[in-house]
Amino acid sequence: MSQEKTMLPWPMLPWMGMVLFVLPMFLSAACLGRSPETRLYTLGSQIRPASAALSSDLAVLVGPARFPRYLERPQIVHRLGAGEVELDEFNRWAGSFEENVLRALALEVESGIDSDRVVAYPSDPPFALDYRVRIHFDELVVGPEDVLKMRSRWAIRSGEGATEVVLGRTDLDEPLRDGSIAAVVEAHDRAIAVLGDALVDAIREIEAARAVEASDSGRP
């Protein structure tokens, strides 16, 4: 007498069902691609050629600079309005924001006075300084209207003694050419160029006044 054996299904544990449910979803998500790659940006790539208007060996330290706390971060920041800001996690500054701004500004000043003795804070130059520049930014951010707003106050102090010479203010509303991140970076460069021009003009005025003073003091 033959006996037939009936194969009973292997008992499925609860966790096995969960794995069979989740695994296809995980593989499907992986096939859709990875998360966006983070891109890094620098300022100071649009510096104009040196001007021959004030060729000199003036030594200038540009910085430090102060920013609102919400700008002291590597992410590119956008102001959304109503007190809200957005941090772009996938588009960031290469280095700190302050480092980028001061480097670009120092290059603008260097070009404007045609001197190779212009350095950005926190550099410790091996030469005596003629001027120190400090900047306070109340705003340097793109708003909801796709306009970069710069509100800055600055002071130029003379020499190692840090005697205050000139106080100034440079404000600017710089429209973006489009909504791209490249346009945001370009707008920052243009705003820094305007601020750099203001600093160079102030240094020229100080130098001109000193030349007149020296000429007058040399008269009999």
Image (tube, helix red, strand yellow):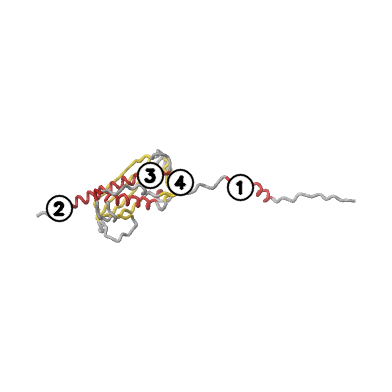
**In this rendering, position of residue 60 left or right of residue 33:** left
Work out which quarter of the rendered image holds the C terminus and state it: bottom left
The disc placed on residue 147 is none
Q: Is residue 87 above or below residue 161?
A: above
Q: Tell me which numbered mark, 1 or 3, is placed earlier along the sequence.
A: 1
Earlier sequence position, callout 1 versus callout 4? 1
Q: Amino acid at mark 1?
A: Leu
Residue type highlighted by circle 2: Ser
Left or right for 132, reference 35: left
Q: Which residue is mark 1?
A: 27
Q: CA distance from mark 1 to mark 4?
A: 28 Å
**Mark 2 and mark 4 residues within 8 Å of each other at the beta carbon:** no
Where 125 falls versus 168 (above or below)?
Answer: below
Task: Please tell me whether mark 4 or mark 3 is closer to you in this view.
Answer: 3
Residue 24 position in % (x across, y down): 63, 46
Mark 4 = which residue? 88
Q: Secondary structure at mark 2?
A: helix
Count numbered badges in the picture: 4
Are there few (<14), some (14-19), or many (20+) residues within 10 Å of tag 3? some
Residue with the mark numbered 3: 186
> Callout 1 environment at 10 Å: few (<14), some (14 to 19), or many (20+)?
few
Q: Nearer the viewer, residue 4 or 141?
A: 4
Q: Amino acid at mark 3?
A: Glu
Label 4: element kind: strand
Tag 2 residue: 215
